[in-house]
Amino acid sequence: MKIYIFLTQITLVYSQWFVGEEKQQTTTSNHTEDASKPFPVVSPVECILECQKVLTYGYFVDTTKTCFCMKNKDQKIFSIEDENLNGTFYQQDQQGGVCPDIQRKSCRKVKEDCPTSPSGFYHIEIDGQIVKAFCDLEVEGGGWLGIANITFNNASLMQTYLGYVNNEAPVSDLQNIGDGKFMLDAQVVKRLFTEHGYTEVRGKCFKNWHGRTLHFILFGEETVKYMRKEEMTTHGSCQKARYLSDDTSYMARTDCSTIRIGYGLSHPYHYHLLWKAVTYQVMLDNRFACDDSHFSNAFTNTGYWLFFVR
Ligand SMILES: *[C@@H]1O[C@H](CO)[C@@H](O)[C@H](O)[C@H]1NC(C)=O
Ligand SMILES: *[C@@H]1O[C@H](CO)[C@@H](O)[C@H](O)[C@H]1NC(C)=O
Ligand SMILES: *[C@@H]1O[C@H](CO)[C@@H](O)[C@H](O)[C@H]1NC(C)=O
Ligand SMILES: *[C@@H]1O[C@H](CO)[C@@H](O)[C@H](O)[C@H]1NC(C)=O
């Protein structure tokens, strides 16, 4: 009885996430081809669950009670008879519910596949590796990959936090971004812009002492060049930066031609980078600035910094 109830619940949950599409799948008996191999299951739910483990879609053939895990709809399936099989291809429901965690190319793809899904951790491919990464699927159209989270709330830990900032964290550590002690390796970030089609940076920071939030997006050709390290510093942020609705910063109210993106050659990280002379800065290196500078009255370091790319 218990088992029955358990299965019913799973069926319910999965039927909310998945839609089935009847499909005649092309088969091949060619052992050398990259075709999906069958295995026996009792139900479509079991098929979906098994295929979730290897981050693929399920194809269930009812007549033979077999399941195939499929990377995509067009993948061939293996059958000795080599005659096309009639089954049901299960894919996630585009209309809503939690997005099944299937390996995807980017957070942008997660957003495309599951437009109403909440932000969270998804398996995506970053710089050639499959990792669990944080996708913000809500702010400004969603599809943002979290690359840094420095949540610095204890001023006496300055040296420790400088360590996190200067530590070039590898892609494989992205799943720890929620600890607030993470900055992704600048070389990886560079490659996202040179090789993987990323074009925008979003930064959000907050400082305890002044209580203001700075929330900006850098975009356009010059931003891309900057992130690729083809052009080190661009003067003036007009047509290159915009501010979001929750921004309460002075920087947003400052003449954009006086704000530059990037501030010098010595900096190892190239994605925290708004700068207005000595007064307003965003930086995370030997000090922590957010819409202020260490010359400001009452300056303290504590606050938080989040960076995303898309
Ligand atoms: C089997 O698949 C391989 C790789 O796709 C291909 O080169 C070969 O021609 C196929 N053989 C047959 C008999 O279809
Ligand atoms: C699959 O379905 C088609 C159309 O309904 C039918 O003609 C065909 O015989 C079926 N194939 C198998 C292997 O059941
Ligand atoms: C801040 O860090 C210091 C040094 O590790 C520690 O002694 C102190 O308890 C921490 N304060 C808070 C509020 O966590
Ligand atoms: C950033 O880190 C803080 C502190 O651990 C955490 O509360 C927050 O959820 C994290 N945010 C993101 C976007 O990772």
Image (cartoon, rainbow, N blue to C red):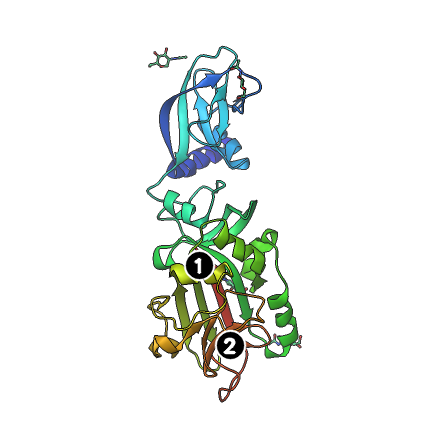
Q: Which mark is residue 289?
A: 2
Where residue 99 sits, quadrant-wise, is top left
The local secondary structure at tag 2 comes to strand
Q: Residue 208, position in %: x, y?
A: 48, 78
Point 54% across, 25% down: residue: 34
Q: Residue 185, position in %: x, y?
A: 59, 59
Observer able to see residue 162:
yes
* Amino acid type, residue under disc 1 in the picture: Val
Point 51% across, 37% down: residue: 55
* Amino acid type, residue under disc 2 in the picture: Ala
Give the Cα separation between the discs numbered 1 and 2: 23 Å
Indicate whether 93 appears above or below 175: above
Q: Nearer the viewer, residue 118 or 163?
A: 163
Q: Nearer the viewer, residue 235 or 124?
A: 235
Q: Which residue is mark 1?
A: 224
- In the rendered structure, which disc, 1 or 2, sits on the residue that comes first in sequence? 1
